[in-house]
Amino acid sequence: MKLNKKHIISWALFDFANSSYSAVIVSVIFPVYYVKAIVGNESGLGDLWWGRAISISMAIVALTSPFLGGIADYSGIRKRLLFFYTLISISAIAGLSVLGKGMVFEGFTLIVLANIGMEGGLVFYNSFLPVIAPKEYHGRVSAWGFGIGYAGSIISLLIALPLIKSGKFEFTWLMTAAFFAVFSMPAFLFLPSNFKGKFSAVKAGIKGFSQTIKTLKEIWGKRNPRRFLLAYLIYEDGVNTVIVFSSIFAATTLKFAHEELIVLYLIVQVSALIGAFVMAKPSDVWGHKNVVMLALIMWTLVAVTAFFVHTKTQFWALASFAGLWLGTVQSATRALYTRFIPKEKEAEYFGVYSLVGKSSAIAGPLVFGYISTAFGSQRPAILSLAAFFLIGLLILRTVRD
């Protein structure tokens, strides 16, 4: 297989496109807007509704991903389905522009649809990688997508900044929808067309589900992979909850302005990238398990320290430090998992890894939301995340690398 530049560029541009959603809607601007302006967060009610939206949407994606993966592999209509899921997400993002104060359920419904469209579509997007690039190029092409996606996050936030400063939030959501739509267009124009599959969509989905169950049973029968995935499910839930609530915590508890949140996000992204590169060699030398455990200890310290933070300066420093370990825990975890994969079963095992990863964004946001509401403060909620890191750490200790 030869590299087709048109395929590679259009595939990477889709990552560039959807990163606008990840940055503007999930991580930085819309969460704060929804929690404070739409719901009201004086008693933690906004946290509860945001936690519900993320948890329910990710639960739906996790439950359906084995079927979607089967359809992507066997039915031959992955491009059509990628377009369908992307259209759902973009339409829901654009719909956010009509929200006003008190439209809690409408905002909840739209963000659930947007997240299902985005995360569900990634199943089909990722399945294009082995189709457009030979195996020896998978790592490089994947990294190119990641890199250009990072650029998409930065550019979309910089475009959003003047809109936020002038209070035009509805145009911010429309801009994000347009950004997503325009830069995803090359993928639908130039990626390989749908092919005649071996099975109908329904039969392909059932085959994908049965294959996932078979692989899960195989892993469950092996002590170390089983314990690793259980640890990963728990501590990654803590990491994902920090990602979706960090901006809300900074805005609600520490009174960060929207412009400050954007700069904070950019700094964390850069520090995460630095952490991943700096700890790459130590991960090979010290052992991936030891590096993951060190990262979880640091994440525990971050959660505990956040409970006591009272100034913006303190939070700037803490967020930069946390970012270093964000990149580390993600890269070292993936490297550690490869130790448990039998030869020629990479796709099946990484399918389960992806399923567990999507499932690890369900419990944490709900726990954060309910604790914040129960105590009327986000500080006990942020402290509770330390339990996810500690429990994951204790289980990981029992895994033989």
Image (cartoon, helix red, strand yellow):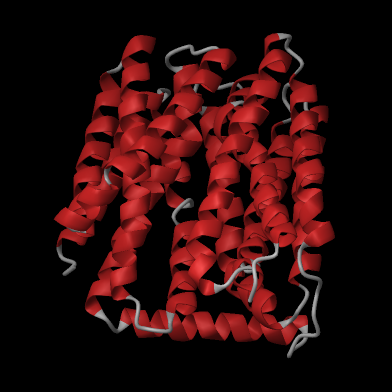
Q: At 77% from the left edge and 69% from the top edge, which residue is drawn? A: 192
Image-quadrant location for residue 196: bottom right
Residue 44 appears in the picture as rendered: yes
Q: Percent position (x, y) of residue 116?
A: 67, 54
User: Which quarter of the figure has residue 271?
Assistant: top left
In depth, the one of 253 and 321 nearer the eye is 321
Instruction: Name which quarter of the figure residue 204 lies in.
Output: bottom right
In this view, 97 is above or below 279: above
Instruction: Locate the N terminus and report the quarter of the image it occupies.
Output: bottom right
Left or right for 22, reference 171: left
Instruction: Tell me what residue is drawn at x 80 percent, y 60 percent.
Output: 190
Q: Is residue 165 left or right of residue 174?
A: left
Percent across and percent down for residue 253 are 43, 17
Furthest-bottom residue in this view? 198
> Does residue 217 appear left or right of residue 154 in this picture?
left
Measured as percent of width and height from the top left, residue 30 is found at: 64, 29
Could you tell me if residue 391 is visible in this image? Answer: no
Task: Report the number of numbered marks.
Answer: 0
Q: Nearer the viewer, residue 51 or 277?
A: 277
Compared with residue 31, is residue 332 higher up or lower down, i.e. above or below?
below
Which residue appears at 67% of the width and 80% of the height?
205
Q: Pick the quarter of the image with the C terminus.
A: bottom left
User: Where in the figure is residue 52, as x and y percent of width and height?
Assistant: 56, 44
